[in-house]
Amino acid sequence: DIQMTQSPSSVSASVGDRVTITCRASQGISSWLAWYQQKPGKAPKLLIYAASFLESGVPSRFSGSGSGTDFTLTISSLQPEDFATYYCQQANSFPITFGQGTRLEIK
Amino acid sequence: EVQLLQSGGGFVQPGGSLRLSCAASGFTFTTYAMTWVRQAPGKGLEWVSAITSSGGRTYYADSVKGRFTISRDNSKNTLYLQMNSLRAEDTAIYYCANRQNDWYFDLWGRGTLVTVSS
């Protein structure tokens, strides 16, 4: 199974800050990676797919990069609605696996 | 409206069974693979099972293999998850989800809570 490891597990930031979350796969997954945002009591929301493609309707302050084993999600200028938990997910092979999540909190 | 409407969650004792349903509307169900993802209380996301658009291929996480069965009825636009031999660690919110042509998930149900406890 492919293990997905996110860092940090939690981060505190302020509105307007730039934030980067990383995700590392235990083996190469090419660009088969997605990022999700989840708010309490809600289903996850797809932000980025294929490592760097912005899902329709997602603000352009979100961006993704990477390939192989190392990936990043960047939020260029945090907005109040961005405080949530973020997950990466590999879609390279079964079993599909998610990272453990990164909680983005208000400083 | 494009949506996945979930039902079938509830409270069950260890060793019991439960069947979850996920009714699709607003899109051509027969062309979409479908997936179940769960989230234990206060924990992260865990992929559970997936099924191809025709139902010809199914996939399972090791944690549920042999106990859970995913299926679909394309005539009813409905996805199912039959859960047998339930354990306390199966307690979670179960989401159905999909996306056409790949294994990312852009449409999610609202989730249904399954609680396994004596």
Image: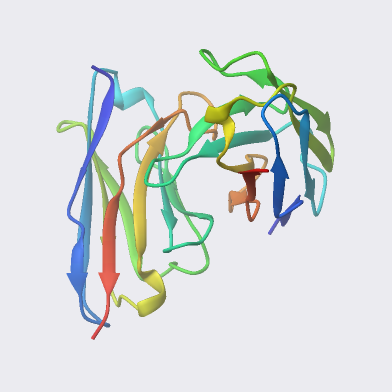
Q: Dividing the image into 4 quarters, which one contains the C terminus of chain B?
A: bottom left
B48 or A20: which is nearer to us? Answer: A20
Residue in the image at 44% along x and 57% along y? B39
B52 or A35: which is nearer to us? Answer: A35
- Residue B83 appears in view: no
B76 or B117: which is nearer to us? Answer: B117
Q: Is residue A35 above or below residue A102?
A: above
Q: Is residue B31 above or below residue A24?
A: above
Residue in the image at 68% along x and 43% along y? A107
Residue in the image at 47% along x and 62% along y? B42
Relative horizontal placement of residue B74, taking residue A28 as reference (left or right): left
Relative horizontal placement of residue A1, taking residue B7 as reference (left or right): right
B110 or B76: which is nearer to us? Answer: B110
Q: Is residue B59 above or below residue B114?
A: above
Q: Quadrant of residue B93?
A: bottom left
Q: Is residue A32 above or below residue B64?
A: above
Q: Give the image location of residue B98, x and y in percent.
A: 42, 33
Residue, far bottom: B118
Q: Dividing the image into 4 quarters, which one contains the N terminus of chain B?
A: top left
Q: How many marks?
A: 0
Residue in the image at 84% along x and 43% along y? A69
Q: Give the image location of residue B26, x and y in percent.
A: 24, 18
Q: How is the image coloured?
A: rainbow
Q: Give the image location of residue B5, x and y in percent.
A: 22, 36
Q: Quadrant of residue A21?
A: top right
